């Protein structure tokens, strides 16, 4: 998760990264609608249940509305190879 957070911070499509420096859960903001990013991943499952051994991601805005920033995505980093996770995220960010 630390390496994914570092790479997200350097990506031009990412506005903010929230990662406390431990554990596998982080969140990040993209400018505008996060749906294209959230639905373009192939390895990372789009689901509400976070914290398993496989990576998953979701946008809470669609469920909680104005309490959550529009572009916020929550990511639970699983046990997959960090480069495979990053490749999936990077292609999703580029397609948005």
Image (cartoon, grey):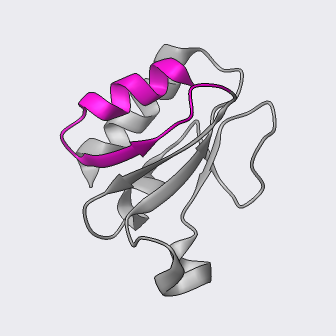
- Residue lying farthest left? 12
Q: Position of residue 25 (x, y in %)?
A: 64, 39
Q: Is residue 45 among what the camera can see?
A: yes
Q: Position of residue 36 (x, y in %)?
A: 37, 61
- Position of residue 15 in the picture relative to residue 4 (left or right): left
Q: Position of residue 10 (x, y in %)?
A: 25, 29
**Dividing the picture into quarters, in which one does residue 70 lie?**
bottom left
Q: Which residues are magenta?
A: 1-22
- Position of residue 55 in the picture relative to residue 83 (left or right): right
User: Compared with residue 76, is residue 6 higher up or lower down, i.e. above or below?
Assistant: above
The C terminus appears in which quarter of the rendering? bottom left
- Residue lying farthest front? 20
**Dividing the picture into quarters, in which one does residue 77 lie?**
top right
Q: How many marks?
A: 0
Q: Is residue 39 among what the camera can see?
A: no
User: Compared with residue 64, is residue 74 higher up or lower down, i.e. above or below?
Assistant: above
The N terminus appears in which quarter of the rendering? top right
Residue at 52% x, 36% y is 19
Residue at 66% x, 36% y is 55
Residue at 37% x, 65% y is 71
Q: Position of residue 95 (x, y in %)?
A: 26, 49
User: Compared with residue 83, is residue 94 higher up or lower down, i.e. above or below?
Assistant: below
- Please check the rendered image and state whether residue 33 is part of the magenta-colored stretch, yes or no: no
């Amino acid at each position: 998760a630390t390496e994914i957070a570092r790479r997200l911070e350097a990506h031009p499509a990412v506005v903010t990264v929230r990662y406390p420096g431990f554990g596998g859960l982080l969140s990040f903001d993209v400018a505008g609608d996060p749906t294209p990013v959230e639905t373009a991943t192939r390895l990372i499952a789009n689901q509400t249940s976070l914290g398993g051994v496989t990576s998953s991601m979701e946008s809470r805005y669609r469920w909680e509305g104005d309490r959550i920033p529009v572009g916020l995505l929550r990511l639970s980093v699983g046990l997959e190879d960090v480069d495979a996770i990053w490749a999936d995220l990077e292609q999703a960010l580029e397609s948005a």
